[in-house]
Image: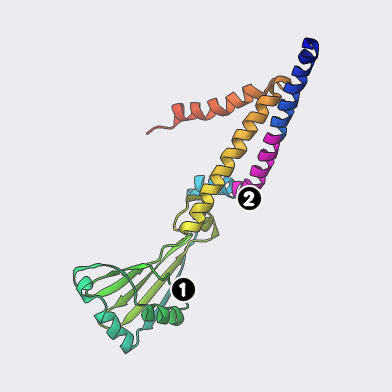
């Protein structure tokens, strides 16, 4: 009986090792599949952000004007007069927003806060890859809108930074980051399993740690 136990122990250890390795490989390829496209995007935009000064971009500016109808102008004048007299933020009235969407071919956010003052209502409309603003004069009803488009490289760079991208994209970045962590950790554990047969494993892992550390110490100054 003791001899049989001694023989089964190495087999059990080998079986457990095989199970862990199979599980790690499974999590590794699943996480790599989930973050593949995101990794390509963030790697590419890492290059474009690092060389932003070398990539020429000619902003394209679009301007539009309109005249608010008298009934909506009266509504705008009466809307939240107490707040407008002291200054403050509040969304545009729904009727004004709907009319602006049709007159200027826009899609204004429902709850976008506008800056109210006695003279005007100003709406800042930042977006990835550009900027926009809208101004309504409260005395005349004159509407001015300006859109600045800095091109698709700038748009991708802003996706990388999560700049003005909204809650859905921010959630995607969080999920993508978790997938990348899982991909990296399972990859490290798989390396550990194979390191005995691959002598260069830990020197290469160490180089990946030491190289950026030396660059930070020697060349990156605060």
| Protein image colouring | rainbow
- Give residue 91's position: percent from left, percent from top: 34, 71
User: Which quadrant is home to the N terminus?
Assistant: top right
The answer to whether 170 appears left or right of 85 in the picture is: right
Rendered view: 50 above or below 162 = above
Q: Residues within 10 Å of mark 2 (few under 14, many from 20)?
A: few
Which residue in the structure is indicated by mark 2?
Answer: 37
Residue at (65%, 25%) from the top-left corner? Answer: 192
Q: Which residue is mark 1?
A: 107
Q: Position of residue 144 (x, y in %)?
A: 36, 76
Principal secondary structure, stretch drawn in magenta: helix
Q: Secondary structure at mark 1?
A: loop
Point out the stretch of residues depicted in magenta: 23-40
Is disc 1 in contact with disc 2, using a CB cutoff of under 8 Å? no
| The quadrant where residue 84 appears | bottom left
Residue under the point 58% across and 48% down: 44
């Amino acid at each position: 009986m003791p001899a049989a136990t001694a023989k089964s122990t190495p087999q059990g250890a080998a079986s457990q090792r095989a199970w862990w390795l199979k599980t790690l490989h499974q999590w590794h390829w699943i996480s790599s599949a989930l973050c593949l496209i995101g990794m390509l995007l963030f790697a590419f935009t890492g290059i474009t952000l690092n060389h932003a000064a070398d990539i020429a971009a000619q902003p394209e500016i679009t301007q539009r004007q309109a005249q608010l109808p008298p009934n909506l102008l009266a509504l705008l004048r009466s809307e939240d007069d107490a707040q407008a007299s002291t200054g403050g933020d509040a969304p545009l009235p729904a009727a004004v927003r709907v009319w602006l969407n049709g007159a200027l071919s826009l899609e204004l956010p429902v709850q976008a806060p506008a800056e109210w003052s006695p003279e005007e209502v100003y709406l800042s409309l930042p977006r990835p890859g550009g900027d926009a603003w809208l101004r309504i004069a409260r005395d005349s009803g004159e509407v001015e809108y300006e859109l600045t488009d800095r091109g698709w490289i700038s748009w991708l760079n802003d996706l990388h930074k999560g700049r003005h991208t909204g809650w859905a994209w921010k959630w995607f970045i969080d999920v993508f980051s978790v997938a990348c962590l899982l991909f990296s950790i399972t990859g490290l554990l798989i390396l550990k399993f194979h390191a005995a047969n691959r002598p260069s494993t830990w020197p290469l892992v160490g180089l990946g740690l030491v190289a950026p550390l030396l660059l930070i110490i020697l060349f990156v100054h605060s």
